[in-house]
Image: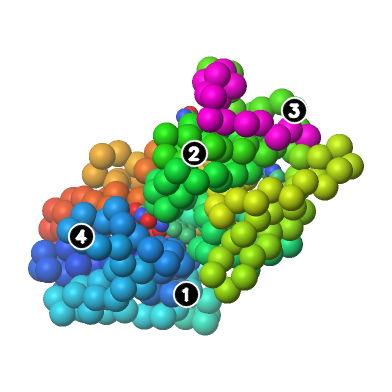
Amino acid sequence: MLDVAIVGGGPAGLTAGLYASRGGLKEVVLFEKGMPGGAITQSSEVENYPGYCEPVSGMELMECWPKQAERFGMRHEMKEVRRVRRECDGSFILELADGSQRRAKAVIVATGSTPKRAGFEGEEEFLGRGISTCATCDGFFYKDQEVAVLGGGDTALEEALYLARIASKVYLIHRRDRFRAAPSTVERVKKNPKIELILNATVKKAYGDERGLQGIIIEQNGKLIDLKVPGLFVFVGSQVNNEVLKQEDGTFLCEVNERGEVVVDLKMRTSIPGLYACGDVRADAAKQVVCAAGDGAAAAVDLIGYIEKIGELKPC
Ligand code: FAD
Ligand code: NAP
């Protein structure tokens, strides 16, 4: 039986693996279905991870994380986990996509979240090259330049306000004339002289060249507008990757909120003993690499005490 199974090899999962193995747990296995390093590997420049004086690419930032954890004994398996379920003795069964199963005393779910795509032409092509889903991460690249924001929810409006402090102008594009965001946020946006609303409008196409985005074509009331902006921030919602917690009957293994985010306490404990969630998959996540890494460490530190406390599990 594994001491701990970690699902997801982004900053949260890899840090949890480092702390769990370095903290003395012997059987620590991390399962990753895609790119080791997680979502940040899509970013061409990261300049807000502490300790780096110069910007680095997401790939460069994450390169050593798996090796560092493996040095202390964490094992890394490139496998997808389909489902985590709980046995009557308190252990967990991980059902893998290849049909095999693993049993673990404790599980850390660190599967991240996925920003939704708006679906216009060129969105994938320019993602990370002018199109972004993270203002905290990429806003500074557009200092004193004009940018556009797409969306009408709390995230889009709050991020438009954030970007207005950095950019020279922010065009806020929304497909209706009513916002989903909180009324107080809408008021602040409307009062901000640097934000121009483009309502009842949709982005049709993003265009540019090998250097990146040069502009977007918007359709508003049947007319096409060519907005020459080097940056477009898309905030049309996101979904947490919580599928592994879905049970056969459609319920979740532990408590999740109305958005499907896993509810945790300050030690990243879920409502089920021995089951932890950290990083972007959890409720109230700041959705930053440094925060995900901190969550992973917090989960592992608590989990070491949990494993000690439960000792050997007796079959039921
Ligand atoms: P993730 O990094 O999303 O990792 C989750 C991992 O779990 C993934 O690798 C995924 O493949 C794996 N996984 C999911 N489901 C399964 C499964 N069923 N089985 C096995 N594996 C699974 N943050 C910053 O701090 N600074 C930045 O500059 C910055 N820029 C960004 C730029 C972009 C384009 C994006 C998309 C995000 C950016 N972020 C930035 C946010 C940052 O990437 C995330 O907050 C961070 O990666 C979250 O870490 P995580 O470990 O929780 O999840
Ligand atoms: P959201 O509330 O789902 O809003 C998504 C927005 O994107 C909506 O305005 C939607 O338009 C628009 N949209 C969706 N698909 C689109 C498409 N294909 N093309 C163009 N526009 C599209 O998402 P969110 O803003 O990320 O917020 C998620 C949740 O977190 C919400 O419950 C929100 O209240 C909460 N949140 C709260 C805070 C806070 O309390 N401070 C901050 C951030 C987020 P329509 O309006 O027309 O559907």
Q: Which residue does the numbered mark 4 point to in the structure image?
A: 53
- Specify the label residue 34 is tagged with: 1
Relative to 192, say whether 27 is above or below: below
| Distance Cα–Cα, label 4 vs label 1 | 29 Å
N-terminal-most mark, 4 or 2: 4
87 or 302, nearer to the observer: 302
x, y percentage for residue 180? 64, 29
Q: Residue at x 74, y 50 (%)?
A: 226
Of marks 1 and 2, the one in the foreground: 2
Q: Quadrant of ligand 2?
A: top right
Dot 2 amino acid type: Ser
**Magenta part of the chain:** 187-200
Indicate yes or no: mark 1 CB to ligand 1 under 8 Å.
Answer: yes
Dot 1 amino acid type: Gly
Q: Residue at x 82, y 47 (%)?
A: 224
Dot 4 amino acid type: Cys
Relative to 13, say whether 35 is above or below: below
x, y percentage for residue 176? 76, 33
Of marks 3 and 4, the one in the foreground: 4
Q: Is residue 72 left or right of residue 5?
A: left
Local crowd size for mark 2, using a 10 Å CA cut-off: few (<14), some (14–19), many (≥20): some
x, y percentage for residue 195? 57, 31
Secondary structure category for the residue under label 2: loop
Quadrant in the picture for the N terminus: bottom left
